[in-house]
Image: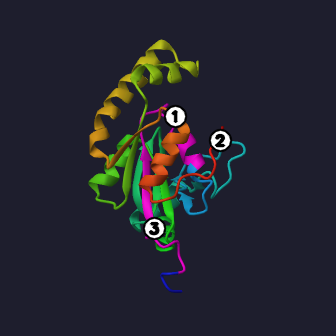
Amino acid sequence: MSHMDGPGRPGTMLLISGPSGCGKSTICRRLLEDDEVVFSVSATTRTPRPGEIDGVHYHFLSPETFRQRISEGAFIEHAEVHGNMYGTLKAPMEEAIAAGKIYIVEIDVQGALQLKALQVEGVYVFVAPPDFEVLRQRLSGRGTETPEVLERRLKKAEDEYRERIKYDHIVVNDDLDRAVDEIRGIAGLPPEVGSRG
């Protein structure tokens, strides 16, 4: 297969990160409607929740298998969160990039900075809230947190927001359609055909 058959541009890792409540999951879902985009499915040692499918939502691994894969160097990055291991697998990313696809990794700010420190090649995009008042409304609008937890999450979001200068691009999610098109442009994809009105 000649390089002319592919999409005509090299594949790339597109890393999407930002504070909780900034809308990164919604943006990723929209980007995934494009055939050129492949989503990174993380591996985890936690038990599947009802309705979760192995290989779709996560790659569910036993702690033994996970540790084995770490020793084989199968992960780009991995971390322990609340007693469970999570990690980004290398092979699917390498396959997608070799096929000229955009490989999306949706990850928290700590994980993103870990990848950047490891000099993992890709385009690092920080999704920012329009301002902190909007983020406060989004997080409190969920109505699930106590005031103390809400303050803690906002403090964490502020700390994460300060890290935005370490990213290649900062996209302000003040309008979803516009933010999606801006990220498509960064990734070398054409704008979405027909906007959702």
Identify the element where label 2 is drawn. Answer: loop
Depth order, front residue of 37/180: 180
Where residue 119 appears, as percent x and y from the top left, is: 28, 59
Disc 1, SS: loop
Q: Is residue 148 above or below residue 47?
A: above
Q: If you read the primary sequence from the N terminus, does the residue marked by circle 1 or circle 2 appear first? A: 1
- Spatial CA span between label 3 and label 2: 27 Å
The circle drawn on residue 1 is: none
Residue located beneath label 3 in the image = 11
Q: Which quadrant would residue 109 be assigned to in this image?
A: top left
- Say if mark 1 contacts mark 3, CB within 8 Å: no
Write down the region rendered in magenta: 5-30
Labels 3 and 2: the sequence-earlier one: 3
Residue 10 lies in the magenta stretch = yes
Q: Residue at x 46, y 56 (%)?
A: 88
Name the residue carrying label 1.
175
Q: Position of residue 23 (x, y in %)?
A: 52, 36
Residue type, mark 1 in image: Asp
Q: Amino acid at mark 2?
A: Arg
The image's colour scheme reads rainbow
Amino acid type at image mark 3 = Gly
The residue that appears at 56% across and 63% down in the rendered structure is 36
In whole angstroms, how far apart are the C-alphas of marks 1 and 3? 27 Å
Please give the label number shown on residue 196.
Answer: 2
- Is residue 180 in view from this perspective? yes
